[in-house]
Image (cartoon, rainbow, N blue to C red):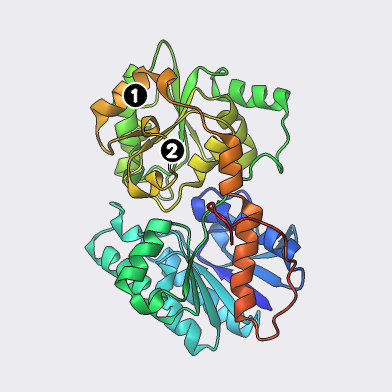
């Protein structure tokens, strides 16, 4: 089966939840089903020129222009034509509801479609009214026309099933994963070098990892940072896809106590997770936050806004605060010691990328008429529970 992948900026080492999802997922899928032929159709501004092979996955740049409103849809349109007429793909795996708008075109081109829902993007503040309606329509098109549908969020999967009863037998909740310890070395010297370059020391900083967009709530975190104990610093990892007045307003607040690193490689972020006093995610909207999963998997103390996607991680109540409530956030930052650290064993068991890969591979197997042989590993269901 030949699979073309659309909806992400690119991989490897391209920052973003969907990008991390794909980078972790597809090499593991290929190990389970080596007969699969997977090509990621990346956006040219985010990856090096020329086709590369990443752990058996072909990553091929397709022309794209950076633009807030037209980048994704234009690239998806070109990508579908490329998938059909150049790649000769059997299936397209489309990520996110924006590209979902063009699933009817994929079907007209004779392509089977697996769609992964990463979150209700129409709830994000960065979109205007027209864009939000287009995103809702993308979700509708995905629900109506995709052959199989995956949701990384159990609450979103339940909501979709309620709103689209006929979809119930086609949608499958498969979460993101958190297997971060097996593919990156524990190099103390390299970790110390990363911390020194950023300007922090072990255990003397809080951190967040997020794009500089309003729905990530970084403005709330900056408002509350004065209540961090002692001389503790705040490290903000991430950049803005397109620089604007909001990201400029955040960056203007950088100083001795607030450090903006910009985008970092995953290998540079891991030491920050391991040595932070607290990881904070102040989001107003999420699908299933990989950054929080990775921090938890490395045993960090984690503080999350109490939105439904974060509550779905089922952490103790002390790991949450009311979204948008800066005073409550300040109180939590004053008492970091009262916030429990992540239970790495539990997180790695419930959110194992190897299990996620097998369950996703099963979705493609269900679509394959030949029923190609997949390795039947004895694995629990991703997200907890048994198959």
Disc number lying in front (1 or 2): 2
Find numbered disc 1 in the image and state the secondary structure of the residue it sits on: helix
Q: Residues within 10 Å of mark 1 (few under 14, many from 20)?
A: many
Image location (x, y in percent) of residue 229: 39, 14
Whether tag 1 and tag 2 are in contact, CB under 8 A, the answer is: no
| Image quadrant in which you'd find residue 100 | bottom left
Q: Nearer the viewer, residue 200 or 144?
A: 144
Instruction: Tell me if residue 340 can be seen.
Output: yes
Instruction: Tell me if residue 51 can be seen.
Output: no
Residue in view at x 43 percent, y 77 percent = 102
Answer with mark 1 or mark 2, whichever residue precedes in sequence: 2
Q: Is residue 347 above or below residue 28?
A: above
Image location (x, y in percent) of residue 180: 64, 42
Q: Quadrant of the N terminus?
A: bottom right
Identify the mark at residue 228; answer none if there is no mark.
none
Q: Nearer the viewer, residue 209 or 10?
A: 209
Identify the mark at residue 315; answer none if there is no mark.
2
| Image quadrant in which you'd find residue 48 | bottom right
What residue did someone put label 1 on? 332
């Amino acid at each position: 089966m030949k699979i073309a992948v659309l909806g992400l900026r690119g991989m490897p080492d391209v920052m973003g939840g969907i990008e991390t999802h794909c980078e972790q997922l597809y090499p593991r899928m290929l190990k389970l089903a080596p007969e699969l032929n997977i090509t990621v159709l990346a956006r040219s501004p985010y990856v090096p020129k020329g086709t590369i092979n990443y752990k058996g996955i072909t990553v091929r740049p397709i022309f794209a222009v950076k633009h807030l409103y037209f980048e994704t849809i234009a690239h998806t349109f070109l990508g579908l034509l490329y998938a059909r007429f150049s790649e000769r793909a059997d299936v397209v795996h489309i990520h996110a509801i924006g590209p979902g708008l063009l699933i009817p075109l994929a079907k007209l081109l004779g392509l089977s479609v697996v769609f992964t829902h990463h979150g209700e993007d129409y709830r994000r503040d960065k979109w205007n009214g027209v864009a939000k309606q287009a995103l809702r329509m993308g979700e509708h098109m995905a629900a109506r026309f995709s052959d199989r549908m995956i949701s990384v969020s159990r609450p979103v999967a339940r909501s979709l099933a309620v709103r689209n009863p006929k979809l119930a037998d086609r949608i499958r909740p498969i979460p993101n994963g958190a297997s971060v310890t097996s593919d990156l070395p524990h190099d103390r010297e390299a970790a110390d070098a990363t911390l020194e370059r950023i300007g922090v020391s072990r255990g003397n900083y809080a951190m967040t990892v997020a794009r500089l967009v309003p729905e990530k709530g970084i403005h709330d975190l900056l408002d509350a940072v004065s209540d961090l104990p002692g001389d503790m610093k705040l490290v903000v990892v991430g950049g803005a896809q397109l620089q604007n007045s909001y990201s400029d307003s955040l960056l203007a607040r950088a100083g001795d106590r607030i450090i903006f690193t910009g985008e970092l490689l995953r290998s540079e972020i891991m030491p920050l997770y391991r040595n932070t006093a607290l990881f904070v995610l102040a989001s107003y909207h999420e699908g299933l936050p990989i950054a929080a999963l990775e921090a938890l998997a490395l045993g960090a103390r984690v503080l999350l806004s109490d939105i439904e996607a974060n509550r779905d991680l089922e952490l103790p109540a002390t790991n949450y605060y009311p979204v948008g409530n800066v005073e409550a956030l300040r109180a939590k930052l004053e008492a970091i010691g009262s916030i429990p650290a992540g239970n790495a064993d539990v997180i790695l068991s419930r959110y194992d990328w190897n299990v996620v890969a097998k369950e996703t591979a099963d979705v493609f197997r269900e679509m394959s008429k030949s029923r190609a042989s997949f390795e039947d590993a004895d694995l629990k269901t991703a997200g907890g529970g048994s198959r």
